[in-house]
Image (cartoon, helix red, strand yellow):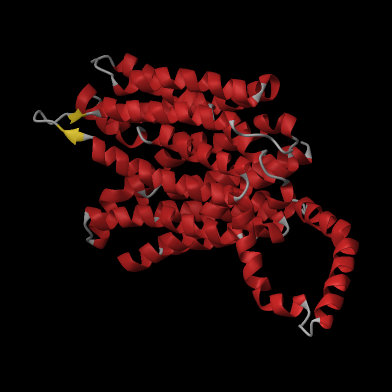
Amino acid sequence: MSQEKRLLLILAAVQFCHIIDFMIIMPLGKTIMEVFDISPGQFAWLVSAYAGAALVGNLISTAFIDRFDRRTALLFLFCGFTLGTFACAFAPTYFSLLVFRASTGIFGGTLGALVLAIVGDVIPLERRGAAIGWVMTAFSVASVVGVPSGIWIAAEYGWSAPFVATAMISSAFVVLAYFIVPSLRGHLDDQARPQVQKKDRKAMEAAIDTAALQEANLPPAGMALAPKHGLRKVVDPFVRIFSDANQRAALLFTMTLMLGHFTVIPFIAPYMQINIGFEDKQVGLIYLIGGLLTVVLLPFFGKLSDRYGRMPVFTTASMFALASIYALTNLDTDSIFLALLATSSFFVVASGRNVPATTMITSVVRPENRGGFMSIRQSINEMALFASTLIAGFIITEGPDGKLEHYEWLGYFTMLMSVIAVWAASRIRSVA
């Protein structure tokens, strides 16, 4: 196996662990509420603490992540994530579990951004779609294998057992990453080159400025600016990102794509149970079949985007996604087969378009600034995720017969966001 393939497998494993850790707490809600004697609202804080901390972690890492070897950053964040997951398993109180979940989210959220930054650094743009397709299958594998296994482990050994299992798996991958992931300093070399090229010119300008200041009996410019130098280093990445129209378009694209994807997801299972008549065990088929299909087809979407272009593949998949979202949110049938067909098609095309979308996003920034940009991008993702949940909860209501109403309205909003995402994607230009 080539070194590139080994690296992609490790990155996919990192994503798998991160996604499992984020998802596993949701199906354990009833047990955790009983163990810690907390309300549903308090449990909701456990779920949101991870995403909120990930948002903060990504904002902080934006200013610093590009200053380190990618390997060093990956190992540091992965170790912190693993320790946080272990700590969650042994939390004695609700408050300590809340703190440990937030701590894990700080590391886990930044890990997701760093993985995509590494793929962007290592894989050439013409082959990047296929590589991202493989890495993104981690989400599907987590849905198909990780979450059901975690639920079974919790039923057999208690609520903390899935966290122990996830931490042990993560520990094994930390060791593998230590031996497999090479030093990745290309982005640091790219940062150094422009500085070397500008060195002589800056020295000349400084000499001229210093002479002029001495004539005016003023201190050299460097002395005046020195106290602000540290702050400037922190602020510069944000200024660079938000002053670039191309990168702003990519962030708008990220936000609208998330709103055009995740907004309908929280109510898929309740809608199928309450309105369509799915039994509890049949709900599992939604994620099992949809997850299996995406495991098989996501790499295929990557190959298509490499061969025919990222924008054409994304636009085509988005058009199919519009039809799939409409069918899913306007479903009115007692046929389990038709319902599974609608949900599976949504999983495939909505997830499939994320492959060329992510590939496009990684191409809007050069390697020396990619880590910081991907951290900001991950923060936008977390904000859109939070907003989509609020929007869904605001639109969906319970009818007099107990059924969910206005799910189709949610579908129309999601379709509108998907159309805006296509427009935003057309504004993106590759700088690779």
Q: Residue furthest left?
A: 400
Q: Residue furthest bottom?
A: 217
Residue in front for this viewpoint, 320 or 108? 320
* Residue 376 visible somewhere in the drawing: yes
* Residue sitting at x 52%, y 63%: 83
In this rendering, position of residue 9 left or right of residue 104: right
In this rendering, position of residue 17 left or right of residue 178: left
Q: Quadrant of the N terminus?
A: top right
* Residue sitting at x 53%, y 26%: 352
* Residue sitting at x 49%, y 31%: 421
Residue in front for this viewpoint, 346 or 188? 188
Instruction: Give percent across and percent down for residue 43.
Output: 29, 55
Residue in front for this viewpoint, 109 or 384? 384
Q: Residue furthest front?
A: 216
In this rendering, position of residue 297 left or right of residue 209: left
* Residue sitting at x 47%, y 63%: 103
Instruction: Give percent across and percent down for residue 251.
Output: 54, 42
Instruction: Give percent across and percent down for residue 3.
Output: 77, 41
Snapshot quadrant of residue 231: bottom right
Q: Looking at the image, is 110 positioned above or below residue 356? A: below
In this rendering, position of residue 298 left or right of residue 207: left
Instruction: Give percent across and percent down for residue 427.
Output: 59, 32
Residue in front for this viewpoint, 303 or 415? 415
* Residue 93 visible somewhere in the drawing: no
Q: How many marks?
A: 0
